[in-house]
Image: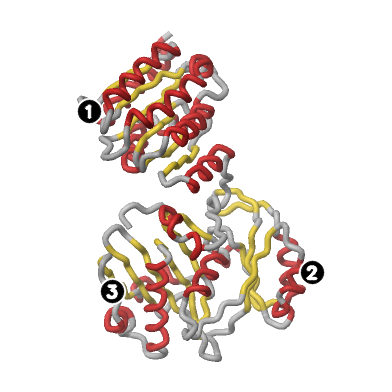
Amino acid sequence: TTKMGRKKIREIDAKRLLQNNLPSTLPVKFQNVQVTTATSFDLLLRENDWLSTTRLVVKPDMLFGQRGKNNLVLINADFPEARAFLEERLNKTIEHNNTKGTLTHFIIERFVPHTVEYYVSLVSNREETVISFSSQGGINIEENWESLSTLSLPVSDQLTEQDINSKLLSHLPAHRDKISAFISALFKVFEDLDFTLLEMNPFTIDESGQLAVLDIRAELDGTAHFKNVKKWGQLEFPAPFGSKITAEESFINGLDEKSGASLKLTILNPEGRIWTLVAGGGASVIFADTVADLGFGHELGNYGEYSGAPNEEETFHYARTLLSLATRNPDGRPRLLLIGGGIANFTDVAKTFRGIIHALKEFKEQLKAAKVSIFVRRAGPNYESGLRAMRQVGKEIDVPIDVYGPEVPMTSIIPKAIRLLAEPVVATTCS
């Protein structure tokens, strides 16, 4: 995939996708349930009677690692012990890697007695998929990196049994056929379901000869959602541990999911004074980097992009959401809105600008109250008419709008704009 939106998913979802898509001939067994703050333990037990007859493992399922090292994993427990462990920890606020968050999702699985732990990972890069294997998996894998065998497979190539055996499993004394078949099947599912990361650390082979995936981290390509709706099923992309999705981010996520275009918004600093309305994923990265390089990264309010030819209504809703954030709580200090992008290939600039102009008109008073200055740089189909309309709306709503086309480099508006933020600061320190 050339453009990937890497989205982390919960362990229970990763295991469900594997269970539903690995061949039934493969001796791999999954047995797990999710527990959240809304779970009734009595109902859980009634619907999953294996919980009362099997030894269990319990751990948080919230996109963070090192759970075992942080006393958050219960191993080889019966159900009453598992329930007590969960009741003590559900809804509890903890600190992990300097981030505070509340424990809301856990996974309960069957406990698998085992003597050996293997590691396997598949990572999708722009040009290749990198597959790694070690026979020394588990919590100390980082101390055993030298045991890792790695195979890089160009995007268009097929993975062969010979590749697996000669490049990944050449040092493996036992179970080579079973593990080779497992890696081969994993690769097919990885490709078919648009995973960008699949890391099992560890997986093992139990006493009955069945493969068991004990721990898994997974990411999917969010931009492939439209073609995988049926295969992925009910799937959420949770926020990282400790971060809460704001109402605005949630609204844009919903807009993005319903659209054929790409609409992304992450709020970095709600009190920031520099806000960006940028067309294209590449351009949005360059804009954010340039602001940071100029020493104003701490003032960047958001990171986001609109691309893939959104219609006028989608652009209006996107711009309106951003303007509501950028104009909030005026404090007398100047603010900036950077409306930018590279040279569009097929997006009609004038058409997308119509949606933005509609939002600017609606926020005329708020823009003035928050002392927002707007800088525009855009090129592509119909850009002259789009830029003309931008100049016109500036006069109409009486908000300063500086407008540029392809005659200036894309990021040249940023230092010009930032001078407006820097000047008052200089003035006050001199007086």
**Of callouts 2 and 3, the N-terminal one:** 2
- Give the labeled residue for mark 1: 406
Give how far across and how far down residue 316 sits, in percent. 47, 31
Label 1 to label 3: alpha-carbon separation: 43 Å
Which is more foreground, mark 2 or mark 3?
Answer: 3
Q: Is residue 35 above or below residue 109?
A: above
Check disc 2 and report its element: helix, strand or loop.
Answer: helix
Label 2 to label 3: alpha-carbon separation: 48 Å
- Give the labeled residue for mark 3: 158
Q: Is residue 363 above or below residue 348?
A: above
Which is more foreground, mark 1 or mark 2?
Answer: 1
Give how far across and how far down residue 413 sits, in percent. 30, 25
| Amino acid on which the number 1 mark rests in the picture | Pro
Please say whether residue 191 is visible from this viewpoint.
yes
Check disc 1 and report its element: helix, strand or loop.
Answer: loop
Q: Residue at x 46, y 36 (%)?
A: 314
In the picture, measured across the screen, residue 209 lies left or right of residue 152, that is right
Q: Quadrant of the C terminus?
A: top left
- Give the labeled residue for mark 2: 42
Please say whether residue 58 is visible from this viewpoint.
no
Give how far across and how far down residue 240 sits, in percent. 53, 51
Q: Quadrant of the N terminus?
A: bottom left
